[in-house]
Image: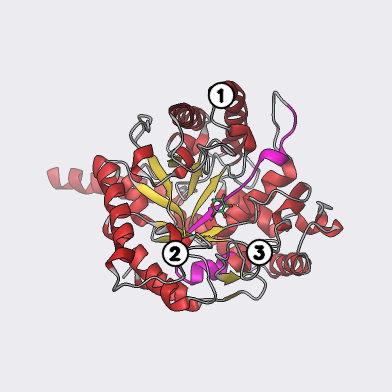
């Protein structure tokens, strides 16, 4: 009798397990099936090539790029993929907020290997409408570009995005629908590649961190983030929000010198406002991982003393570090960096140790959201050696890094380009290989 009872309970258990699996709509496996179906659909690929062609000829805000719409509209395939990624079913209804892993920030950060910034693109501030994407000389972003980034070994995509010029008037600050959709299309290129994707607020003059400007900055920040959070509410933990880029008192003596007490205080307030807004915005946003910068995302430990980290177990500290500055970013600095020169390696060691001691070891994971060494007269050997060492040292401390690639290869600007987005080839494979080697 006891035996029969046992077999019956086992049967019931098996039956209910089967039923559970059969209706598991949100399992990653199901999402993958949908995704593959979309990617293998010829029509949507052709549509994307057309978009790419359109972008190829555009070095600036030509008439064509001024938001005429059509060529920039997502193909049907893109739309379906978007809905999939957003956790909406065929009828467009929001699914419940269960398709996100409830993991700690440290756990999530440990899954990030190395990332790539789509720089000078969605953050560009020229042009009009969605044409701003190409206003700094980069072509329209295509799925193939992001595929190439993934294929090279980057598992994270940071999308610096400027919202300022795509907002309606106060008090709603409604984001232009076409812009939001364009951002979403590119987010999906990353998500469908199983990458982590970070979106932020990049060149926003409205968030000047002073007491006088605080109420106005808070109104815009909370309203715009609430809209973004709603748009992406169904996305899982692969999508990360970064509240601000390098919030700082632009154009003042405090811009790059660690700020003053007031500036750092207002950055703290805005970070807290950002976290509260996202946590209250529904869907998966209660469990989403969020990045908050220090003043100017500064890597100078002196700016960290009065940095306030809100109580929340899914926060990641965002730091930018083009270190050593004279080699990596300063055009009138040096083009030489050598592993054998202790003066060259010391600054990187110091940076990683400080980040570890101040944040990581205290339970606050860090992502270096921007780093890179610009090309200086083809100083490839130094750049490769630097890249490998930087990534290696960061990895030892559990800190993933995201290369700043602004698509620039010549001229007098900051030459951080690695991927030739028009040719879909790596202009400096030596640097990419060195970055990957640093991870080994
Ligand atoms: C900042 C700026 C970006 C610049 C980079 C390197 O992120 O926003 O435009 O290129 O730093 O200087």
Q: Position of residue 393 (x, y in %)?
A: 30, 61
* Sequence order check, earlier mark of 3 and 1: 3
In the foreground, 343 or 135: 343
Residue 207 in which image quadrant: top right
Q: Nearer the viewer, mark 3 or mark 1?
A: 1
Residue range highlighted in magenta: 146-169
Residue at 65%, 43% in the rendered image: 91
Which dot marks residue 142? 3
**Are the residues at dot 2 and dot 1 in contact (C-beta closer than 8 Å)?**
no
Is residue 84 or residue 262 the one in the foreground? 262
Q: Position of residue 164 (x, y in %)?
A: 67, 39
Residue 406 is at least partly visible in this image: yes
Q: Position of residue 370 (x, y in %)?
A: 47, 54
Q: Which mark is residue 214?
A: 1
Question: What residue sits right under mark 2 in the picture?
Answer: 327
Q: The C terminus appears in which quarter of the rendering?
A: bottom left
3D distance between C-alphas at marks 3 and 1: 37 Å
Q: Quadrant of residue 92?
A: top right
Q: Within 10 angstroms of label 1, few (less than 14), some, or many (20 or more) residues? A: some
Q: Nearer the viewer, residue 231 or 439?
A: 439
Q: Secondary structure at mark 2?
A: helix
The reply to whether dot 3 and dot 1 touch (C-beta < 8 Å) is: no
Q: Is residue 178 positioned above or below 383 on the image?
A: above
Q: Are marks 2 and 3 in contact (CB under 8 Å)?
A: no
Give the number of callouts.
3
Give whichever of discs 2 and 3 has the lower sequence position.
3
Q: Position of residue 206 (x, y in %)?
A: 63, 33
- Label 2: how many residues lie within 10 Å, few (<14), some (14-19) or many (20+)? many
């Amino acid at each position: 009798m006891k035996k029969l009872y046992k077999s019956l309970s086992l049967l019931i258990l098996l039956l209910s397990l089967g039923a559970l699996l059969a209706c598991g709509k949100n399992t990653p496996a199901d999402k993958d099936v949908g995704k593959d179906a979309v990617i293998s659909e010829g029509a949507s690929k052709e549509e994307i090539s057309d978009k790419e062609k359109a972008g190829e000829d555009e070095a600036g805000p030509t008439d064509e790029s001024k938001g005429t719409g059509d060529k920039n509209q997502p193909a049907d395939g893109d739309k379906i993929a978007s809905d999939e990624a957003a956790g909406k079913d065929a009828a467009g209804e929001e699914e419940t907020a269960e398709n996100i892993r409830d993991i700690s920030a440290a756990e999530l950060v440990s899954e990030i290997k190395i990332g790539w910034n789509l720089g000078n693109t969605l953050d560009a501030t020229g042009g009009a409408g969605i044409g701003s994407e190409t206003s700094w000389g980069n072509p329209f972003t295509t799925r193939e570009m992001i595929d190439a980034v993934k294929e090279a070994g980057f598992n994270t995509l940071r999308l610096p995005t400027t919202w300022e010029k795509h907002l309606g008037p106060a008090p709603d600050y409604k984001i232009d629908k076409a812009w939001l959709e364009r951002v979403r299309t590119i987010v999906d290129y990353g998500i469908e590649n199983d990458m982590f994707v970070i979106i932020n607020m990049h060149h926003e003059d409205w968030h000047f961190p002073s007491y006088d400007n605080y109420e106005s900055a808070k109104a815009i920040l909370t309203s715009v983030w609430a809209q973004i959070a709603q748009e992406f509410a169904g996305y899982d933990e692969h999508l990360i929000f970064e509240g601000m880029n390098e919030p700082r008192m632009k154009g003042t003596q405090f811009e790059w010198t660690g700020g003053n007490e007031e500036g750092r205080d207002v950055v703290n307030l805005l970070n807290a406002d950002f976290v509260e807004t996202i946590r209250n915005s529904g869907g998966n946003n209660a469990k989403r991982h969020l990045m908050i910068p220090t003043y100017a995302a500064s890597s100078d430990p002196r700016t960290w003393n009065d940095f306030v980290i809100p109580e929340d177990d899914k926060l990641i500290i965002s730091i930018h570090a083009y270190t050593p500055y004279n080699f990596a970013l300063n055009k009138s600095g040096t083009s030489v960096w050598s592993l054998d020169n202790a003066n060259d390696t010391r600054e990187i060691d110091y940076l990683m140790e400080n980040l570890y001691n101040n944040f990581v070891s205290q339970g606050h994971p860090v992502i270096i959201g921007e780093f890179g060494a610009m090309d200086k007269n083809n100083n490839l050997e130094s750049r490769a050696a630097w890249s490998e060492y930087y990534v290696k040292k960061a990895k030892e401390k559990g800190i993933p890094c995201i290369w700043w690639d602004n698509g620039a290869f010549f001229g007098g600007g900051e030459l951080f380009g690695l991927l030739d987005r028009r040719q879909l080839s790596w202009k400096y494979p030596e640097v990419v290989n060195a970055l990957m080697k640093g991870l080994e």
